Image: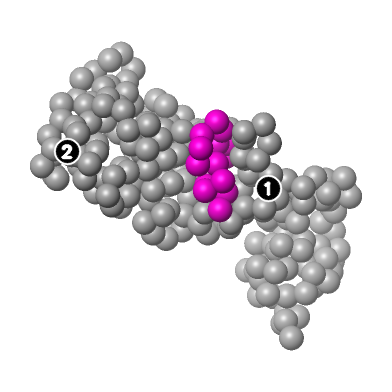
Amino acid sequence: MPPTKLTIAHQKEIMSRYTAGELAAPLAREFGVRRMVVTNLLNKHGVEKHTQSYAAFKCIEGTVNEAAFDVITDEAAFWAGFLMIEGYIYNGYVYLEDVPQLKNFRKFMNGTGKITDNIYDFSSNKVIQRLAELGVTELKVLSATPHPDLADNHHFWRGLLEANQWGSVLVVPEGLAEAFASFASSVGCPSKVTPKGLVCSVRVSPKLKEMLCIQ
């Protein structure tokens, strides 16, 4: 039987996250209590309830595994690299569109939302915050730099190169170009970074592509 009590810290977190837009039922599941416990908590503290239309929209929109990037598994590293190039973050949403890997990304996120007009998107402040820690930010086209835990990760660079369609040249922000060149040199495939205005180009050797393709 699910517990009926929440710690003070959990109560505050639930109220904060509900106010930010999350729904009562998923919060109850996450904290291991009945939905009634959450609704009673919200009523007790006078938290304004979501409208029925809003709740219906959120259910249609779907949910995701908000812990997908918490631990840098091989798959999480791959998708962090992929999102460095493809997709974007805007106004509280993560968007990915017009790529063959849409269904694979939704599967990785354990997402329930639909792919519409070749676009998969979801809203999650927690995922966006974690992606920012990993270097995937709303302004990544100007300032992308990988987290130190990803800088030498083969799966991260494989994801990035796959998003770049395994092209022979990367055109990316300076921090990302320098990180790639450093990684390439560390595996015996040195590459030169060439400034191009606000971004830099760096060549991707056939040897490196072959090495990463079989990871």
In the picture provided, is 34 more to the left or to the right than 214? Answer: right
Tag 2's secondary structure? helix
Q: Nearer the viewer, mark 2 or mark 1?
A: 2
Q: With respect to residue 142, does 75 lie above or below?
A: below
Q: With respect to residue 81, does 12 lie above or below?
A: below
Query: In front here: 138 or 211?
Result: 211
Residue 15 percent across, percent down from the top left = 72, 59
Residue 41: in sight, yes or no?
no
Residue wearing tag 2? 207
Magenta extent: 93-107
In the picture provided, is 36 more to the left or to the right than 5? Answer: right
View extreme (bottom): residue: 1
In the picture provided, is 177 more to the left or to the right than 144? Answer: left
View extreme (top): residue: 197
**Separation of disc 2 and disc 1 at Cα?**
39 Å
Residue wearing tag 1? 113
